[in-house]
């Protein structure tokens, strides 16, 4: 396997373990990143065995995973007027764009704050553990952003997560012990 193929193979592994993509989506995603020197059939053939490996591992997972608990927290935050998105784009800037789109599509005034994690955060969580969550207020108001962050921190702690945050708007909320376990 050459360097480009190793990159694609690792991407497939991360996509599978993220739990966000179907086989069809991953096949299309492989097409998007293939280089000329890659064996596309061999690489696409890695998807199903990796999914089977994950299905086998899932049998040992707890009934309610950390990802399930985080999804529940995000649902509660939505109800409280905080737009909470998982896997929002791949970067911070794409995450902010997805938040803006979600807020635009929501009823006027429904959201007063937001939080999200993006694709790079997911990859880091799979590889190393832990998860970073960005946050803010819909209005450019640092005090409101801090209130939003405190609400998020309280909700995460109530769900049993260890939370590290320095109490400022400059640092994202960190779930240092977060173990990424999202079923496909």
Image: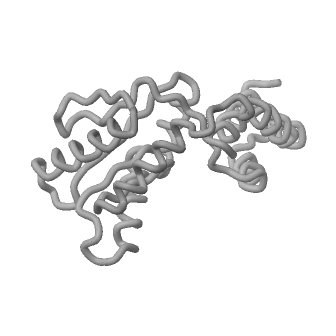
Q: Identify the residue at image location x=74%, y=27%.
A: 6
Q: Identify the residue at image location x=77%, y=37%.
A: 55
Q: Identify the residue at image location x=56%, y=37%.
A: 65
Q: Quadrant of residue 126?
A: top right
Q: Is residue 42 left or right of residue 183?
A: right
Q: Does 58 sit above or below residue 1? A: below
| Residue 144 spot, x, y in % from top left | 14, 52
Q: Does 99 sit above or below residue 31? A: below
Q: Is residue 117 left or right of residue 123?
A: left
| Residue 145 spot, x, y in % from top left | 18, 49
Q: Identify the residue at image location x=37%, y=73%.
A: 106
Of all residues, the one furthest to the bottom in this rendering is: 108
Quarter of the picture holding the N terminus: top right
Q: Does 137 sit above or below residue 7? A: below
Front residue of 36/15: it is: 15
Q: Is residue 6 left or right of residue 103?
A: right
| Residue 3 spot, x, y in % from top left | 73, 25
Q: Quadrant of residue 81?
A: bottom left
| Residue 169 spot, x, y in % from top left | 19, 40
């Amino acid at each position: 396997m050459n360097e480009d193929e190793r990159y694609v193979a690792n991407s497939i592994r991360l996509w599978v373990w993220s739990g966000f993509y179907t086989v069809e989506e991953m096949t299309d995603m492989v097409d998007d990143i293939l280089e000329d020197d890659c064996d596309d059939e061999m690489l696409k053939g890695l998807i199903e065995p990796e999914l089977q490996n994950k299905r086998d591992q899932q049998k040992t997972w707890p009934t309610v995973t950390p990802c399930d608990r985080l999804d529940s927290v995000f649902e509660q935050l939505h109800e409280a007027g905080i737009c909470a998105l998982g896997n929002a784009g791949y970067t911070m800037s794409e995450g902010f764009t997805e938040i803006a789109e979600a807020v635009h599509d929501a009823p006027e005034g429904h959201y007063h704050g937001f939080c999200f994690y993006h694709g790079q955060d997911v990859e880091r969580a799979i590889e190393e553990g832990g998860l970073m969550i960005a946050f803010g207020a819909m209005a450019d108001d640092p005090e409101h952003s801090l209130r939003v962050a405190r609400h998020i921190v309280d909700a995460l702690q109530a769900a049993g997560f260890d939370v590290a945050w320095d109490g400022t708007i400059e640092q994202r909320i960190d779930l240092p012990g977060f173990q990424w376990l999202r079923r496909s």
